């Protein structure tokens, strides 16, 4: 799990700490006048203190933190995570985080945050921290949110929100999508479960906080348009679950894949799980666009991004795809990467490879993207072959997320004839 110490550097929109040029240009122009005024002010303060006209050092006038100008509205709205407690007192006992969660709740107050589709505020956190009974806090939080929260890293995240609240963040919408939360370590990641590499909060860059662009609000991109979210409205998947399952059944007449997925979904929902069938049959054009958005969103610098565009252009020609997208933004490489990030988030793509884009099982009706959250403490499943699986998901280590539950995954692979691509969070394939 994440350790409970961290380091932090704050960068403000008007300049970096230690960079005197950002703060002293006007003072330099006024040189000796500024010095004279400062000396006069110091003498006046000394006289005032002697007369008792100013507050003492222990009063609110001296105890309050200095005011800080909020970031410019033009600045990208991101959270820069760290692993130091700036607002929440460092936990005395790393195994008992209830006091930290309660403190965060009191400071958060009525500030509402969107995390992976769940809205929470201070009172909700306080209620979880103070809930009676023997259940460990980790269990209470995962059940309360219906998400596989990494509790220690979630506390770090709350601390960073409270740190940046006075800088203008409290007045803005704060959205952390599921993919952002997994990437940052706030939610458990497949690497935590299957690779033994815990996703440490603070080690994976800034966290965007802007609301994602829902597909239903977009007009389709036109031929020749720049990359961006509107491309998600071209080459669309079936939008409703029943349509998606019908498309899956229709593309491979006689195959039982669709009926097995439908039966699994029905059983999971009947036991209270939250089930989302995000994708079944997908066109090659859509797969290409999803891969391209993912690749460019991960670019580290201009050279990396231009190389990625070169790969995408080559693939479009070799695969004979008539996808009329313009991959390079005229605003420069960073504008291109930002447009790709927004595009990837609209697609909800969390993982993509060239091999998968070239020949995905989605194109032939042999794969689905299935997300199942808030699994019950005791899960029972009946397989098409008559086998019954029973799973105890009550221990604190249980993610309560189907894609992060190794024992359940292995049983489904054996008895439902499925294959789970563990590195791709929602992806399941037909093994029959």
Image (tube, rainbow, N blue to C red):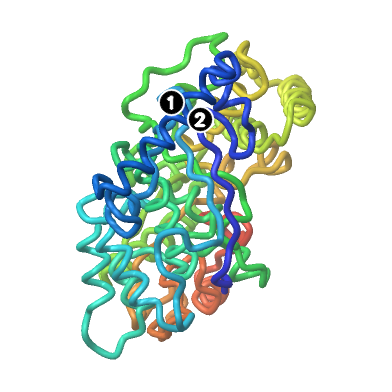
Q: Is residue 432 visible?
A: no
Pick the quarter of the image with the N terminus: bottom right
Vertical position of residue 379 compared to residue 160: above or below: below
Q: How many marks?
A: 2
Query: Which type of secondary structure does the marked residue at label 1 adopt?
Result: loop
Secondary element at tag 2 = loop
Q: Residues within 10 Å of mark 1 (few under 14, many from 20)?
A: few
Labelled pair 2, 1 in contact (Cβ < 8 Å): yes
Hey, which quadrant is residue 247 in on the image?
Answer: top left
Residue hosting label 2: 13
Please tell me which residue is depicted at 25% across the width and 63% down the height of the picture. 106
Residue annotated with mark 1:
72
Q: Residue at x 45, y 57 (%)?
A: 157
Which of the pair 381/117 is nearer the observer?
117
Q: Earlier in the sequence, mark 2 or mark 1?
A: 2
- Mark 2 and mark 1: Cα distance apart in space: 6 Å
Q: Please state if 138 lies on the left or on the right of 357 as rendered.
A: left
């Amino acid at each position: 799990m994440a350790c409970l110490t961290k380091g932090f550097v704050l960068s403000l929109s008007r300049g970096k700490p230690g960079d005197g040029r950002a703060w002293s240009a006007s003072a330099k122009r006024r040189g000796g006048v500024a010095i004279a005024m400062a000396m006069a002010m110091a003498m006046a303060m000394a006289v005032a203190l002697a007369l008792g006209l100013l507050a003492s050092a222990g009063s609110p006038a001296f105890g309050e933190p200095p005011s800080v100008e909020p970031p410019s509205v033009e600045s990208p709205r991101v959270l820069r995570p760290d692993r130091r407690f700036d607002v929440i007192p460092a936990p005395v006992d790393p195994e008992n985080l209830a006091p930290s969660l309660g403190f965060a709740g009191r400071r958060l107050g009525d500030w509402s945050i969107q995390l992976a589709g769940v809205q929470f505020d201070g009172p909700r956190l306080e209620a979880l921290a103070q809930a009676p009974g023997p259940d460990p806090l980790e269990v209470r939080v995962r059940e309360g949110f219906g998400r596989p929260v990494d509790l220690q890293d979630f506390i770090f995240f709350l601390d960073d929100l409270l740190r940046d609240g006075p800088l203008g963040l409290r007045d803005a919408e704060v959205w952390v999508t599921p993919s952002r939360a997994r990437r940052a370590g706030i939610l458990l990641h497949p690497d935590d479960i299957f690779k033994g590499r815990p996703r440490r909060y603070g080690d994976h860059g800034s966290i965007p906080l802007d609301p994602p662009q829902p597909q239903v609000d977009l007009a389709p991109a036109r031929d020749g348009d720049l990359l961006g979210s509107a491309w998600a409205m071209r080459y669309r998947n079936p939008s409703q679950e029943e349509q998606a399952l019908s498309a899956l059944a229709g593309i491979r007449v006689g195959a039982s894949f669709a009926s097995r997925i439908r039966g699994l979904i029905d059983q999971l929902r009947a036991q209270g799980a939250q089930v989302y069938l995000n994708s079944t049959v997908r066109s090659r054009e859509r797969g290409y666009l999803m891969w391209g958005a993912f690749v460019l969103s991960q670019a580290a610098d201009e050279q990396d991004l231009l190389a990625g565009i070169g790969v995408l252009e080559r693939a479009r020609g070799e695969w004979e795809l008539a996808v009329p997208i313009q991959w390079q933004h005229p605003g420069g490489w960073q504008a291109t990467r930002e447009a790709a990030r927004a595009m990837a988030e609209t697609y909800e793509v969390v993982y993509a490879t060239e091999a998968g884009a070239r020949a995905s099982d989605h194109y032939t009706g042999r794969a689905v993207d299935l997300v199942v959250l808030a699994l019950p403490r005791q899960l029972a499943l009946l397989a098409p072959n008559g086998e019954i699986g029973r799973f105890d998901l009550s221990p604190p280590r249980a993610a309560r997320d189907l894609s992060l539950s190794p024992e359940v995954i292995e049983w489904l692979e054996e008895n439902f004839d499925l294959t789970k691509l563990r590195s791709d969070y929602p992806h399941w394939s037909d093994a029959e």
